Image: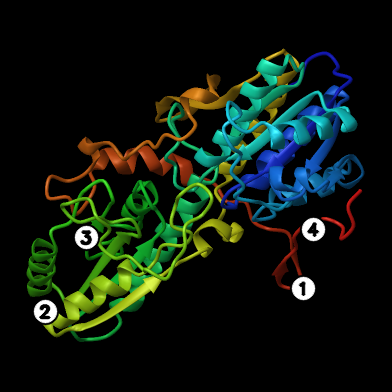
Amino acid sequence: MAPQESWNATVLVGQSGGPTAAINATLAGVFECAHQLGARVLGMRNGIEGVLAGRVVDLDGLLSDPLQLDLLRRTPASLLGSCRYKLPDPDGDTAPFERLFSRFETLGVDAVLYIGGNDSMDTIEKLARYGERAGSPIRFMGVPKTIDNDMVGTDHTPGYGSAAKFVACAVKEVARDSAAYFLKSVTVVEIMGRDAGWLTAASTLAGRPGAGGPDIILLPEAPLDVDAFVAAVEGLLEERDTVVVAASEGVVRADGEPLFRDESVGIDAFGHVATQSGVGRYLAALVKGRLGVKTRAVEFSTLQRCASHLASATDLEEASTLGGVAVQAAKDGCTGMVPVMRREHNRPYSVSYGLSAISAVANRVRPVPAEWIRPDGMGVTDEMREYVRPLIQGEAAPTFVEGLPWHLWLPEEDA
């Protein structure tokens, strides 16, 4: 996005929640647009929690070199570090807000941008609300990211396309490996997705059932009848030797309770299970016990969100553009807003950019549409494939040094 005019301002930007392969591309877009406008850019180290602790870094010296900025776009995870710090409701407890706004004033901040998912939008919405009530001139903008793709108000979120590309490629490779032996076997691949199955649904791009793609896809949106599931697996084994199941970590039973719950896992500040895994192992053990065939559970775990060697070029480009849209909107006087994407066409693929109120986005979850899920709840339709395919297009190869990807790191000491 080409910035207009100049802006003698200080922009404070942070990253929060689960990292992605594209969140640094958004940071690069924020910096590039702000820098071109003439604004100074400061970074929160470990999000809003870092600001409260006085951890802020000056990004101008680090990123003003175009080569460093390009390296940032190809670096996975969150350069600035992340957090899962939940601010209280400003209508009840104002103490942390008073500390934050005092810190903003000391730094001379004109705009605060927070890159994150649904929970991070909760943080920036509360800051915007408190700022408006306090008469602060600071503009507050959310910038979307999440591999879960469950943010409302936007066609998709940065981070999802790259994670979907990794999932589809990895499932395709796992399916090839599973078919190498002449025996009956079932492989269950567990994929991230606590409340929504967008990422698991992307596994459909691996190919047709029995030809690289998963035979069964299980999403949180479609409660699972375990007896029907075992019967479906048994029927498939009568047709072929190998069955591949893609299962979301958040699969639930008919009563809405999790299919598998690890009672040893704690709850994070936003009331979510801190880590959620075990569905793959549960289903593999279930099938082995009922059918007596060889089973294996595969968990991609955090590789889904940090595998930048398989990042989608489309994803990185859109992530960077959204960062610039947020900066330009803040310069134009917007606050309490988040940039969103609207799909114009599928073939050829194109999107337009707009703004939505953060209050309409925060603390809400967008599920996979029911009409994109098969009637039996164990697969997805062609509409899902058409939706996700454009988002994984293009390769953004890392910069390799001595055979390994080279990544950008922050200096050890705060500026």
Name the side, left or right, on which 105 lies relative to 192.
right
The local crowd at label 2, few if under 14, some if 14 to 19, many if 20 or more residues have their Cα within 10 Å, is few
Secondary structure beneath dot 3 equals strand
Q: Residues within 10 Å of mark 1 (few under 14, many from 20)?
A: few
The residue indicated by pointer 3 is 216
Assess whether mark 2 and mark 3 are in contact (beta carbons under 8 angstroms).
Answer: no
Q: Which residue is mark 4?
A: 409
Callout 1 touching callout 3 (CB < 8 Å):
no
Task: Work out whether residue 93 or residue 112 is closer to the camera in this orientation and state it.
Answer: 93
Residue at horizontal 9 percent and vertical 61 percent from the top: 228
Q: Amino acid at mark 2?
A: Arg
Please state which of residues 119 and 100 is positioned toward the viewer in this rendering.
100
**Residue that badge 1 annotates:** 402
Mark 1–mark 4 distance (CA, rounded to whole Å): 18 Å
Residue type at tag 4: Trp
SS at badge 2? helix
